[in-house]
Image: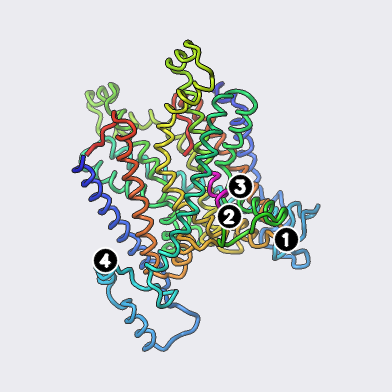
Amino acid sequence: MIRIIFQRILAALVTLSLLCVLTFLLLRLAPGGPFDTDRVWPPEIQANIQAKYGLNLRVSQQMGIWFKDLLHGDLHESFQYLGKPVSELISEAWPVSILLGTLALLVAVILGIPLGCLSAWKQGTWIDRVFMFVCFSGLSLPTYLLASLLILIFSLWLMWFPPALWEGPEFWVLPTLTLAARPLAILARLTRTTVIEVLRSDFIRTAYGKGLSPRTILFKHALKNSLIPVVSVLGPLAAQMVTGSFLVEIVFQIPGLGMHFVQSVLNRDYPLVMGLTLTYGVVLLTAHLLVDLSYSWIDPRIRVES
Amino acid sequence: MNRFLKNRWAVLSLAFLLLLTLATLCAPLLTRYSFEEQQISQRLSPPSFLHPMGTDLLGRDLYSRILYGARVSLTVGVVTALISLILGTLSGALAGYFGGWVDRCLSGITHLFYIIPSLLLAILLTLVFGKGLTGLLVALSATSWVTQARLVRGQMLQAKQMPYVEAARSVGASTLSIIFRHILPNLWGPILVALTIQIPTQVMSESFLSFIGLGLQPPYASWGVLASEGFGAMRSFPHLILYPGGILFITLMAFNALGDGLRDWLDPAGDRNLM
């Protein structure tokens, strides 16, 4: 087992370096540079700026320097926020994204699983139909449309919550709901399917046969056994929450990783893009690794293949 | 076929999508104004008889812009879904059929693309290939073939054990002929279902990229561009975002309902979970 974990971590490190190399090359291939302005500088000044940031070196050399400094824990300074190290910018931004993602996932789990369960229990009734229709449309709802509807209703019309920024709990509500909608729909649909399947199995009939109350059967027998597939999508969903917050962060002007990423790419802020890519890579690879390993823990019949 | 026709939602969706396609093809006949004609005196007018969906900041007719925008959104969606389908099917088929180092190489690449968040890669690619149609097409095709590759690889692994493949090989069919003439035609069901899931995903991704400002540039419009233009003015003129966003929502629902219907018809035992 330990050998397998070790192998997996090694493979993840290779993937991570490939991701960094790919991003580095794509960034340099993109037209435009970090210090392009409308104003034309004299060539000496231009050359000085290029030399200061090592942009006059060959791309392979620049990449070498980046990787070497990475091993020393140095992600360089941002080009856009002059004098600010990338690591500082990231450490300011990631708690925001993590909080947003966690809140959204919590809302999705707390509402999605019970509602899916209820829907399965009331299978075929109007409650089930209405609810499944809502979930189905939730999967087709573009993020920005949901965000605008929420802002229109709750901040411009009812004036309950502020429409943008991230300065306190009342600012958290609308972005969290926007981000939670999709995973909520996914979880509810999945829970419904698996609970229905479990409710048809023999041991449920046995439970009825020995006279248990419907409530005990639903909560003690059916729900517990249908949670395995649900738990297994939580890992990928959690990863999606971290990276899926791009649009939510842009729409609500939240200073998290996603907003920084989009802006740094547009500004050609090479070090910041690299730092953020690395952060995303580490988060995602860790999530995948944990999911892979947790399969064999949830269901020992599944062996982890080397 | 009866099974499919019985699904009212799927049939309704198919009808809606056909009608929408027809309307976008005949857009010049159905609109009074062109999508770039500016009437400054009419700017930001609410929906009226002349402008059924109102006008935008520059006095352009929103209804015309939505109808012309549908051309871009739908074309990008369908074209990139087809490209990613072909790429994914090829890569998955080769990996699944040959196994060994071919599989290890292709699966490695697939895994890398699977891990990278597609929006992140798409943003970088649109920069390299320029904002606009080319950038969108490359970015969206490159990031979406992975699911298809994984699906086809799995199907291929099963299919190559089947007696009919063995039979084809024993009568001397070449490897290529076995893959393309014997196995792949048998997989058209799951592939078609994957296509109907892929198109709405692509339309949605296009609108996201355009919303961030990486898609088509003005005066051209796609639904994402319109939503992005409308979002800024939402406070005072909600119709600017509600119309383009709403029509995108309905179209995506139609595609998803159609996909569900097709899946029930072609693959009744398959799982119905939309991720």
Residue A61 placement, left or right of B48: left
Residue A232 placement, left or right of B51: left
Residue at the far left in the pictured view: A3
Q: Contact, CB < 8 Å: mark 2 with mark 3?
A: no
Report the span colored magenta. Answer: A170-182
Residue A3 placement, left or right of A124: left
Residue at the far right in the pictured view: B49
Kindly identify the residue that appears in the image at 44 percent across and 48 percent down. Answer: A240
* Residue B236 - label: 1
Q: Chain of mark 1?
A: B
* Residue A224 - label: none
- Residue B97 vs residue A247, the one in the foreground: A247
Q: Chain of mark 2?
A: B
- Residue B7 vs residue A98, the one in the foreground: A98
Is A180 contained in the magenta span? yes
Secondary structure beneath dot 2 equals helix
Residue at the spot of label 4: A67
Mark 4 neighbour class, 10 Å CA radius: few under 14, some 14 to 19, many 20 or more: some
Mark 2 neighbour class, 10 Å CA radius: few under 14, some 14 to 19, many 20 or more: many
Secondary structure beneath dot 1 equals loop
* Residue B248 - label: 3
Q: CA distance from mark 2 to mark 1?
A: 20 Å
Q: Decide which of tag 2 and tag 1 comes sooner along the chain.
A: 2
Residue A77 visible, this orientation: yes
Magenta stretch, main secondary structure class: helix
Amino acid type shown at disc 3: Leu
Are the residues flagged by discs 3 and 1 from a single subunit?
Answer: yes
Q: Chain of mark 3?
A: B
